């Protein structure tokens, strides 16, 4: 480290979009004389890249900021920056409540982090930018490798990542009534196709094997601005085909999708685009038409099930996962039973389930008929218990089959990897295997959240 180099530390809360944004900030800081450190207490600059999707996520950020206030008392030169959704939502209020915060940077302003820090150093006064005027997604080159940290504090990456996220969209126009994203991430915008393909090509040339395309609702990619040379709409299924044609890419995934925009062409992609992994995260949120309407989801349970049926026709064996909210305002026992019935019918491989949480500015936060915390907890426990049982049954179906697994970690002859269906597999006797290798593994045991296997063949 040279005399002029400063140390930064980024902590990422929440979703994969935030993980990618943290990489972009880390990349931009390296051009401004910063290097990444391992210890938050030693850093010259601490960035909290925050999430406000539920009240609990926001509370975690506020309690860490409380801890940092004490750290800063003993190291007053330390700069503290709050980025992401809490920064966007709270803006100037955050600095008023937390005078030890130096920089508040909104979701669309992360690309300006370097110049904003220079301003902070030169002017000495605290900076707040949460403007969205005329924004676009700038071209940026991928960063390799990255050492940003997840919420648990663990490094999110091995020294070199074989699987990377590529942002293809920002924002959301859907205004589901419970959701804060349209307010914290702005209107939906699709990234330029050329920039996406260039980023994937650079990643693959550097050795990356798998990419996951990211957006809040990737199914509507292109709606806002992408067209083909002939002037026709360029859709998400076109993008999947073009990305999959990048030579050397082994696996392609994407997340997240709103079922209302799931087209037949996109469903067919699971059959036709060979590199597209046979797994699909399709958030349903509720199994009650009445609640789906109140959520402004714009599909019914019947329409969702119809799409699930078609997906299985196009790709038998596709692994489906979902998101569910329990205790939305006005949710009755009968509505909740609808969600349980849907779980029985689809038998999701896995799900993320949440208790409804009021978010500032959303329409649902103004609704009457809020469900008691205790009832929400009971419903969540019932849902999760049944999901765990179903996940175990689903995972048991893989016993005896041989799966292609990409190795993520390998230590002392014990490896962890991932199937194309996105299942974690643990196995031993992997001598000679390296992260990024593809191996054939026979599945011998199934748990609720992972599989165990024995090595069949190293390709
Ligand atoms: N774009 C995705 C979609 O349309 O389904 C959802 C992305 S959101 C970042 C991730 C998940 O958080 C949602 O699917 C929903 O289940 C959950 N979520 C969002 N707002 C919530 C709230 N106010 N309370 C509880 N869960 C919420
Ligand atoms: Fe939020 Fe997803 Fe609805 Fe957009 S589509 S408002 S991100 S839940």
Image (cartoon, rainbow, N blue to C red):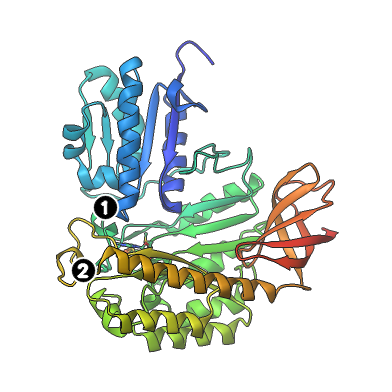
Residue labelled with disc 1: 184
Q: In the rendering, which numbered label is found on residue 426?
A: none
Residue 456 in sight in this render: yes
> Which tag is nearer the camera, tag 2 or tag 1?
2
Q: Does 212 sit above or below residue 297?
A: above
Label tally: 2
Location of residue 26 (image quadrant): top left
| Label 2: which secondary element | loop
- Horizontally, residue 31 falls left or right of residue 87, namely right
Residue 292 lies, in percent from the top left, at 30, 78
Q: Quadrant of the C terminus?
A: bottom right
Quadrant, the N terminus = top right
Closer to the camera, 124 or 392? 392
- At a point 41% along the width and 56% down the height, the residue shown is 192
In terms of image quadrants, where is residue 294? bottom left
Q: Position of residue 273 (x, y in %)?
A: 60, 72
Figure quadrant of residue 258 = bottom left
Q: Residue furthest top?
A: 3
In the image, taking residue 425 as reference, residue 15 lies left or right, namely: left
Residue 235 appears in the rendering:
no
Whether ligand 2 has any atom under 8 Å from the Cβ at mark 1 is answered as: no
Residue beneath label 2, please? 370
The reply, left or right, for residue 255 in relation to residue 67 is right
Question: Would you say the beta carbon of the disc 2 residue lies within 8 angstroms of ligand 1?
Answer: no
* Residue at position x 34%, y 15% in the image: 74
x, y percentage for residue 96? 16, 33
Decide: few, some or many residues near mark 1? Use Cα within 10 Å; few <14, some 14-19, many ≥20.
many
């Amino acid at each position: 480290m040279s005399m002029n180099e400063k140390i930064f530390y980024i902590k990422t809360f929440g979703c994969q979009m935030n993980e990618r944004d943290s990489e972009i900030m880390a990349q931009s800081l390296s051009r401004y004389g910063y290097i990444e450190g391992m210890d938050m207490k030693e850093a010259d600059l601490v960035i909290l890249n925050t999430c406000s999707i539920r009240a609990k996520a926001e509370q975690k950020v506020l309690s860490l900021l409380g801890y940092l206030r004490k750290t800063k008392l003993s190291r007053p030169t330390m700069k503290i920056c709050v980025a992401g959704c809490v920064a966007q939502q709270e803006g100037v209020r955050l600095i008023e409540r937390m005078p030890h915060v130096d920089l508040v940077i909104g979701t669309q302003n992360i690309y300006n982090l370097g110049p904003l820090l220079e301003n902070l150093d030169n002017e000495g006064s605290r900076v707040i930018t949460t403007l969205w005027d005329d924004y676009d997604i700038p071209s940026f080159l991928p960063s390799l490798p990255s050492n940003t940290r997840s919420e648990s504090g663990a490094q999110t990456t091995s020294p070199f990542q074989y699987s990377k996220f590529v942002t293809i969209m920002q924002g959301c126009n859907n205004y589901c009534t419970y959701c804060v994203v349209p307010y914290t991430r702005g209107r939906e915008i699709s990234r330029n196709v050329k920039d996406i393909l260039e980023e994937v090509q650079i990643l693959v040339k550097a050795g990356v094997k798998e990419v996951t395309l990211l957006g809040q609702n990737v199914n509507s990619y292109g709606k806002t601005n992408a067209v083909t040379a002939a002037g026709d709409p360029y859709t998400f299924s076109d993008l999947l085909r073009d990305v999959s044609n990048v030579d050397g890419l082994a696996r392609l995934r994407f997340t997240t999708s709103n079922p209302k925009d799931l087209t037949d062409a996109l469903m067919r992609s699971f059959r036709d685009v060979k590199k597209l992994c046979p797994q699909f995260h399709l958030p349903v949120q509720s199994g009650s038409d009445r609640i789906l309407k109140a959520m402004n989801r714009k599909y019914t349970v019947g329409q969702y099930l119809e799409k699930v049926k078609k997906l299985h026709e196009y790709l038998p064996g596709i692994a489906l996962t979902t998101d569910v909210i329990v205790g939305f305002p006005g949710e009755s026992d009968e509505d909740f039973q609808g969600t349980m019935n849907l779980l029985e019918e689809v038998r999701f491989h896995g799900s993320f389930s949440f208790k409804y949480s009021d978010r500032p500015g959303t329409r649902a936060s103004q609704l009457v008929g809020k469900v008691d915390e205790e009832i929400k907890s009971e419903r969540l426990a019932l849902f999760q218990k049944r999901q765990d049982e179903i996940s175990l049954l689903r995972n048991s179906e893989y016993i005896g089959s041989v799966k292609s697994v990409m190795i993520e970690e390998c230590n002392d002859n014990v490896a962890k990897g991932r199937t194309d269906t996105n299942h974690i597999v643990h196995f031993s006797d992997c001598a000679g295997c390296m992260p990024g290798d593809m191996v054939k593994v026979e599945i011998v045991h199934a748990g609720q959240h992972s599989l165990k296997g024995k090595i069949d063949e190293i390709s």
